[in-house]
Amino acid sequence: MNSLGPTLLAIDDEPGILALVERFARTLQFNVVCHDGASGVLAEIDELRPDVVLVDLQMPEINGLEVLRAIRDVDPECAVVLMTAHASVDTAIEAVKLGALDYLTKPLDFDRLRGLLTTVLKGIERREALLEIDADVARRFEFHGTIGRSAAMQDLFDSIRRLAPHVRTLLITGETGTGKELVARAFQQLGPRRQGRFLTVNCSAVVDALFESELFGHQRGAFTGATETKVGLFEHADGGTLFLDEVGELPLSVQPKLLRAVEYGDVQRVGSLETRHVDVRVIAATSRDLRAEGAAGRFRSDLYFRLNVLEIHLPPLRDRREDIPLLTAAFVRENAARLQRPLTGVTTAAERALQESQWPGNIRELRNVLERACLLSEARILGEREVRQAMRIGSSAAGALEHASAATEPPTVGDSLSSAQRGQIDRVLRQARGNKTEAARLLGISRRSLYRWLDRLGHAEPKASQPGH
Amino acid sequence: MADATRSFDRWLHDVRNQLSIILGFSEILLQELEGDDARRHDLQEIHDAAERAMGAMGRVPQKEDESGR
């Protein structure tokens, strides 16, 4: 359908006119879908996602202006052309006010219709060319997995290039989702330890009592349950890099031992008197203000100053909005490859919506929103509607997860969101007594999108039971 | 009277629609035919007749309904 080229939807109660429009539009490489009346077609607009609709003004049951209104509600970016055998100035004005692209009288003036359809085609081609450029620029401005052409990010990349060969200890600060781990990895890849290990420990995910053992290891019998001797992460990372994510969550009790390990490379397994020397580059990251945490007695100031030999701050996404189109292009292409669908980017209106958002979850949130929008969309270019819908689902899911993620391990945000999404879809499916069509309607998504979500979330549903398939 | 006007309007609309179909398809075929195709002349006759009929429709005296349309 949409994947093969632009789609034109023709609605007229006269089959001959439909045949005529179909015959003409096919010569311009449109996929043409015909409906001999408006009833029922509005429910399908969502799945069909036409690029242009040609609709007769005078039809029994629902007239063309009502169809135009309904389409504007569902998909404001869809071009709608009204046709009439009975022109009147009033309806022409109303059609234009409602956002119709044009108003054609019958017999159809093919030159004019060709002009209109060519305008629609050119618009799509122009947008796709721009999206291709964005994707290309995103590739050029990628720096070890981080994308940014803003001055702030270019300065950051320069700093990383200059400092990576020399830095032993580093503190990366920035809000959640700004890409701190990617920067840490860039330091590793550009530094002298690129051959060494890169180990990550998420300090917010480790149980307090196990911290010491995780970082420094333990001797067999050191405590109840220590049935085997265990090598800690510092020893594992010897000769490489240890990335301490969310270091602000580290319990105070472990901090002196960490300070010693960072400062002198000395580590001691729990239950052992022997001090071992390791050569580990420590990169710590936090979304907290560690200075304030220190003042409040929750983080040792000496450890803070030791980690803070060099501080790299990552700006929040809202402070580098010019990077949003590039990030969007990269994430949509990434999803297109993963979902094996010909998605090329977002529409201008969708891009505006993305630009205007505050993005408290930063790049991670943008990435998740685009992943959801890609799952929701039936079209080659994601529309404003899918993007806004994905943003709404994200904000409700994020609210439910906010507290949970602080206490439990958030290994990948995708997993966390999936559980929220699964919960939401399960609830709606129960509400709809298992009826997928009804569930899709309640969720405000198309039936095909719902099936894709169910696949994605691991709901095994026999596709043969799909109604109408 | 209003009913008669409405059904007359409907009739006009339907005939225009049918003529539009004849005109539309004949235009498409005329464009697709080779210049020296023997059928071109016949097709042009169909097209011109439909065009004349459409013109004649425009000269049908319009009845005014109660709203003065």
Image (tube, grey):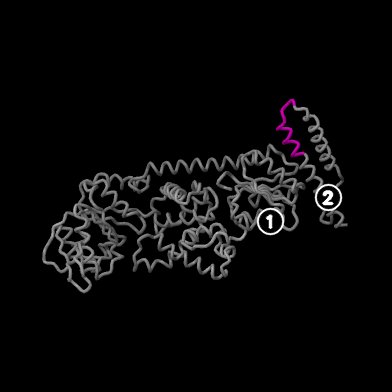
Marks 1 and 2 belong to one chain: no
Q: Secondary structure at mark 2?
A: helix
- Judged from this view, the residue extending furthest toward the bottom is A224
The answer to whether residue B35 shows anywhere in this view is yes
Q: Position of residue A257 (x, y in %)?
A: 17, 64
10 Å neighbourhood of mark 2: few (<14), some, or many (≥20)?
A: few
Q: Residues within 10 Å of mark 1 (few under 14, many from 20)?
A: some
Image check: A154 left or right of B51? left
Residue type, mark 2 in image: Trp
Q: What range is drawn magenta here? A: B23-36
Seen from the viewer's position, the closer of residues A175 and A167 is A167
Q: Which mark is residue A231?
A: none
Could you say where residue A126 lies in the image, as x and y percent from the top left?
A: 53, 40
- The image quarter containing residue A465 is bottom right
Q: Is residue A444 left or right of residue A275?
A: right
Closest to the observer, A91 or A46: A46
What residue is shown with label 2?
Answer: B11
Task: Place residue A46 in its image quadrant.
Answer: bottom right
Cα distance between the residues tagged 1 and 2: 23 Å
Which amino acid type is shown beneath numbered disc 1? Glu
Q: Helix, strand or loop at disc 1? A: helix
Q: Nearer the viewer, mark 1 or mark 2?
A: 2
The prevailing secondary structure element of the residues shown in magenta is helix
Circle 1 is placed at which residue position? A66
